[in-house]
Image (cartoon, rainbow, N blue to C red):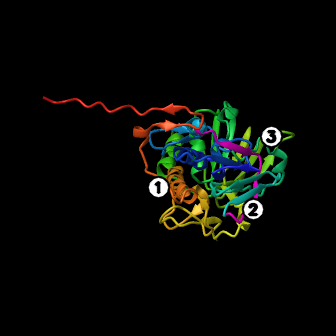
Amino acid sequence: MIKTDILIIGAGPTGLFAVFEAGLLQLKCHLIDALPQPGGQCSEIYPKKPIYDIPGFPEVLAGDLVDNLMEQIKPFQPGFTLGERAETIQKQEDGSFVVTTNKGTQHQAPVVAIAGGLGSFEPRKPQLAGLEKFEDKGVNYFIKDPEVYRNKRVLIAGGGDSALDWSIFLAEVASEVTLVHRRNEFRGALDSVEKVQYLKNKGKINLITPAEVVGLKGADDLEAVTVRKMSDPQEDFELAVDHFIPLFGLSPKLGPIADWGLEIEKNAIKVDNTLDYQTNIPGLYAIGDVNTYPGKLKLILCGFHEATLMCQSAYQRIFPDKKYVMKYTTVGGITGFDGSKKEAPKAVVKSID
């Protein structure tokens, strides 16, 4: 039995930052994640994708953000159960919870925080004959390492932010980038749409709309796709490619957590955002993209805020007779569980004659 103060289900950015905030309160954390490494989607799906809305970082790669968070929480020595999925939860007579994974590993804590992001997710795949045959042989649903596409012919299908962003990024990596979308209008950010149009005019991106990929060809690896232009009459043509990347979004699923007796709304966990992001089960919290409440925004920044307030509430739940007086890290510094301490600089007062 692994025992801890706060058990965090999900080791994405929100879960990792919760470790830091809990550490400032001298609360120990343990994290469970079905993925084999910390970082959630940032590590598994788009580690090389730049993020622009993290305070203090005009631009940071998703993988680098995870590395920085891991460095930040190192003094607080969190435990990890990786490659296992949280399966069941049972409330004990003392009010604590026991969470068991699909591999039978048991964890006990007085507080559980679900930080599972979108939950378990699968890519939305196009209905194409022979698609599975070419998976990982030219057909990919995620871009983990852009260098794989260096000097290659890449076709991206989709009309959202991911399709636009990766088309822009790979325009400087691949030998040829083609973006295909069923409509002339895109669902992504306006500045991204304008950037794609600019790169099209510069000959950096081949933009084909309205159109869709209707066929795949190749002996072993993918060699070409058939594109159908939705004109009147319709027109099919073959395009030689090395990689086909359909980016039609993800189908999120809560998995076993959906059976834990939580209030669920549109595949997200309802929480009380007026105070601490607690669910309908006392002591069980949900933070980050996995939760929902009026005005919810699915941003890493918002997850950090929710994690901070959750930890304050967790402290009061674990130590109901203690009163925590918050001190800024610029005043109190950071004391790790290993005895290490980062001292805050002392104030210097000068007299003025």
Distance from Cα at disc 3 to Cα at disc 2: 32 Å
Residue indicated by mark 1: 323
Residue 200 occupies quadrant? top right
Instruction: Please tell me the numbered disc located at residue 301.
Output: none
Residue at x 75% of width, y 46% of height: 225
Q: Earlier in the sequence, mark 2 or mark 1?
A: 2
Distance from Cα at disc 1 to Cα at disc 3: 58 Å
Give the residue at the far front of this rendering: 321
Residue indicated by mark 3: 137
The amino acid marked with disc number 2 is: Pro
Look at the numbered discs 2 and 1 and tell me whether their residues touch, using CB distance below 8 Å: no
Q: Is residue 281 visible?
A: yes
Indicate the position of residue 270 as horizontal and vertical percent values. Answer: 59, 67
The amino acid marked with disc number 3 is: Lys
Give the residue at the far right of this rendering: 219
Q: Is residue 8 magenta?
A: no
Give the secondary structure at mark 2: helix
Give the magenta range: 76-94
Residue at x 66% of width, y 68% of height: 262
Of residue 162 and residue 107, the one placed in the foreground of this image is 107
Q: Nearer the viewer, mark 2 or mark 1?
A: 1
Q: Earlier in the sequence, mark 1 or mark 3?
A: 3
Residue 134 occupies quadrant? top right
Instruction: Please tell me the numbered disc located at residue 256.
Output: 2
Give the secondary structure at mark 1: loop
Residue 101 occupies quadrant? bottom right
Quarter that holds the C terminus: top left
**Crowd around label 2: few <14 · some 14–19 · many ≥20 (10 Å):** some
**Crowd around label 1: few <14 · some 14–19 · many ≥20 (10 Å):** few
Indicate the position of residue 233 as horizontal and vertical percent values. Answer: 68, 60
Give the secondary structure at mark 3: loop
Of residue 209 and residue 45, the one placed in the foreground of this image is 45
